[in-house]
Amino acid sequence: MPLTPSILYDILIVERSIMVNHDKDTKLLNYLLKTPSPSGFEQNLATFIETRLSLTLPKNQIEIDFHNNVIATIKGKNSKVIMIDAHLDELGFLIKNIDKNGYISLVSIGGRDVTLLRGRNVTIISDKGNINGVIGTKPIHLIVDKKKEQPKNTSEVTIDVGLRNKKEIEKYFRIGDPGILKSNFTHLLGDNYSGAGFDDKAGCFILFKIIEKIVKSKIIPTNTLKFTFSSQEEIGCRGALELVNRYKPDLFIGLDVGFATDTTNTSEREVGNLELGKGIGIHRGINIYKPINELLLLIAKENKIPIQLLATTGTGTNAGTVANEEGGIKVLDLGIPLRYMHSSIEVININDLILGSKLLTKLLLSRRLGSLIR
């Protein structure tokens, strides 16, 4: 393919090495993970995101609404709106009951594998601050039938905060207080990291990197960009739906996680091939706006940015959910390779996040994109 002036413009957009700034980047990723943000209780993380964004953008370009959606705006040359979205909420639970013996039972926020909860550290978020606890488990020596001992519902596990007196416990937190599993952000071999909550705080990390790259480039995008760190995705994509109804974007780009198949227990026949360290996944299929999706693939090829392809039936993510709102919205849907999704510990490769931010920056600053937004 000949290098037209438009393609050359895209290639010459400010480049940065793929090399990860381990000090800066991993600190940001760690802070995103360790700040609790269960669906419906995202205010602490929303405040952090607002503060962190203000280092790059003027404060009048950043907004938090009453449902803790964070919106960062970069004005373009025209009024057409592209929304680039990642959800800031994570799985969690609510304190459902404290019985007379001090046993604390839970109700889940979002869907998770209950069998993986036992023997885990938790954080309860209360008016008194963050309270540490553990989800206890019966000693293996005393288990006669493992199948019967497996919990089937969240209400079958209990939190131990050390005390056994109901009145004493109630001095620290109350029914309805939220909590999360502790993230335990850890560096594995290579550029791989483990923790709880990469879904979708890894996507939030990519949004930060894109914003930084665009501001540093000093290039004014053709279209107005709305970067949305949306709330309540895990309980029905509610934040993204609110934001789409408010801003009525001409294109919605969803950044979420995808099922990595470089494990022993996830079949690529079932979900498609997606591996850590080989680039972000790009969905093709139902409701995906083909002209811009093809441009994204072309930009990846021109700039030798590795990507992976995924099939989508148009469900399961913010992008899939909003596609039929407002009479129909053009959407792209991207999936970050993630091992062990919605479990007590997840694994990502940080290079996939850096590559994803590089690819989307080039798309958003591409002159060719403007002609496809109508």
Image (tube, rainbow, N blue to C red):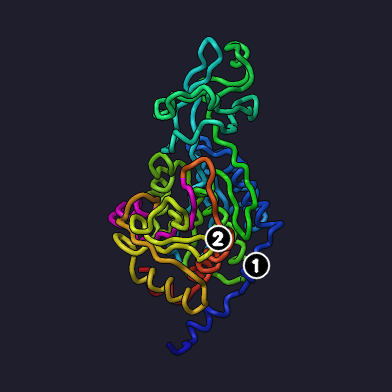
Earlier-in-chain disc, 1 versus 2: 1
In the picture provided, is 324 more to the left or to the right than 242? left
Residue 183 on image: x %, y %: 59, 41
Q: Nearer the viewer, residue 217 or 184?
A: 184
68 shown above or below 362:
above
Q: Which amino acid lies under the numbered mark 2 shown in the image of this protein? A: Leu
Total labels drawn: 2
Whether 121 is among the magenta residues is no
* Residue drawn at x 40%, y 42% as measured from the top left: 238
Q: Is residue 152 visible?
A: yes
Whether 333 is among the magenta residues is yes
Determine whether the residue tagged by mark 1 lies in a helix, strand or loop. loop
Q: Which corner quadrant of the image does residue 368 belong to?
A: bottom left
Q: Residues under labels 1 and 2: Cα distance?
A: 11 Å
Q: Which residues are magenta?
A: 319-341
Q: Which corner quadrant of the image does residue 55 belong to?
A: bottom right
In the picture provided, is 289 more to the left or to the right than 196? left
30 shown above or below 291:
above
Residue 366 on image: x %, y %: 49, 74
Q: Which amino acid lies under the numbered mark 1 shown in the image of this protein? A: Met
Q: Which residue is mark 2?
A: 353
Assign the N terminus to one quadrant of the image.
bottom left
Q: Are marks 1 and 2 in contact (CB under 8 Å)?
A: no
Q: Which residue is mark 1?
A: 19
In the picture provided, is 243 more to the left or to the right than 45? left
* Residue drawn at x 60%, y 53% as measured from the top left: 193
